[in-house]
Amino acid sequence: MADTWKTRTKLVHEGSRRSQYGEMAEAIFLTQGFAYDSAEQAEARFIQSGPDEFIYARYGNPTTRMFEERIAALEGTEDAFATASGMAAVNGALTSMLRSGDHVVSARALFGSCLYILEDVLTRYGVRVTFVDGADLDQWRAAVTPDTKAVFFESMSNPTLELVDIAAVSQIAHEVGALVIVDNVFATPIFSRAVDQGADVVVYSTTKHIDGQGRALGGVICGSRDFVRKVAEPYLKHTGAAMSPFTSWIMLNGMATLDLRCRAMADSALAIATALQGHAKVTRMIYPGLSSHPQHKLAMRQIGSGGTMVAFDIAGGKEAAFRFMNALQIAKISNNLGDAKTIATHPATTTHQRLPDDQKARLGITPGLIRLSVGLEDAGDLIDDLLRGLAAA
Ligand SMILES: *Cc1c(COP(=O)(O)O)cnc(C)c1O
């Protein structure tokens, strides 16, 4: 709406549409279709629908449109398309633009399902994929060729929080005209400056911080109007990737508190990383917000924060890590992230279980590694809980 609005104002109001009743809360338009005033109107709408004209919920819905406009305003992109899950967004962004014979360069450290799309799905249709160590710019330079149509990476990797330099990789990709597609979940849309730093398309699993209360699956693709409406939308709407209106309503409500939540979680994450760093049983502390982190400067330039996730290694391997987790009383053992509730995950036996041992070792997924998604509880209570876990480890 107003160009001068700051983030928090946009998060509360951007994209809002009101019916003739003037309802305060965003309405859930739980409808698959829309009635036309006349056959002529139906015909006209199928030729070209205007910004507030809808045809079918798989193509678009007023509640979903509100969410798309709100997240696009936050991300600083012209448009966005909301999807049924984060994976539908990742798949849609890549598959919609790629053709047999195209080349993609991707960082190797990826969420398991993202790896499946790149390694198994795209290659089945004749797309060539080269994997690189995301933090090593020389590997990006060597892998990108004039045939490269897209580069893909998670800006902060799961679970070891390694950053990819968005500005530097974008420059390498843009020299050959490749599109830069960034999965920005761990950086969060609040700390994201992905587009400012050169990313062309930013995808989120809205299941994470945007919902923020662990209720609904969702995803979104943010990009230029041409990419979202001409490249991604035809693929997404015809293959059934749409976000449900009910989910869109959940995500809209999540947006209103997103800034407050992400900042509170990041403050607590820094407090936790500071408190646990140097503990006798913590052999490695990974938090980009600590000045001791090897990519601290990049984290500050790229996202201006250490983020809401902390990872650390516990001395004593898997047995000690399990004793730690089982002694926690506040943090839950689960595998979502960005939730109001703090979540402890043991990647080696859950989210990354299926990776071969040499891949785990290469990605730093050791038997003692814990990934912590810091929630909204009192930071002091959380530190006490984690110290209780470490005492039991
Ligand atoms: C969770 C996640 C996804 C997938 O999102 P879903 O909503 O579970 O489909 C993709 N990428 C990253 C980095 C994630 O954390």
Image (cartoon, grey):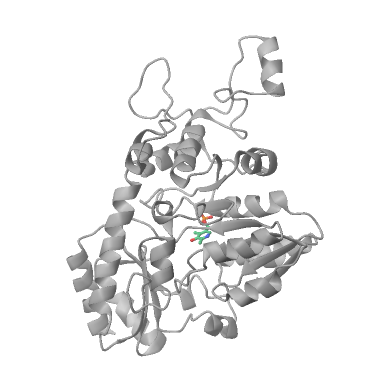
Give the tally of numbered discs: 0
Q: Quadrant of the N terminus?
A: top left
Res 45 → quadrant: top right
Residue appearing at x 54%, y 52% in the figure: 203
Q: Nearer the viewer, residue 216 or 6?
A: 6
Left or right of residue 100, residue 194 in this image: left
> Which quarter of the rendered picture does the C terminus lie within?
bottom left
Front one among 371 and 266 = 266
Picture coordinates of residue 227, whole percent (x, y): 65, 44
Q: Position of residue 315 (x, y in %)?
A: 34, 89
| Residue 192 in view here | yes
Judge whether 349 appears above or below 115 on screen. below
Residue at the spot 22% in from the left edge and 78% down from the top edge = 387
360 w.r.t. 38: above or below? below
> Which quadrant of the figure has residue 107?
bottom right
- Asked whether the viewer can see residue 152, the reply is no
Residue 369 location (% of width, % of height)? 41, 80
Residue at the image position 64 percent from the left and 54 percent from the top:
91
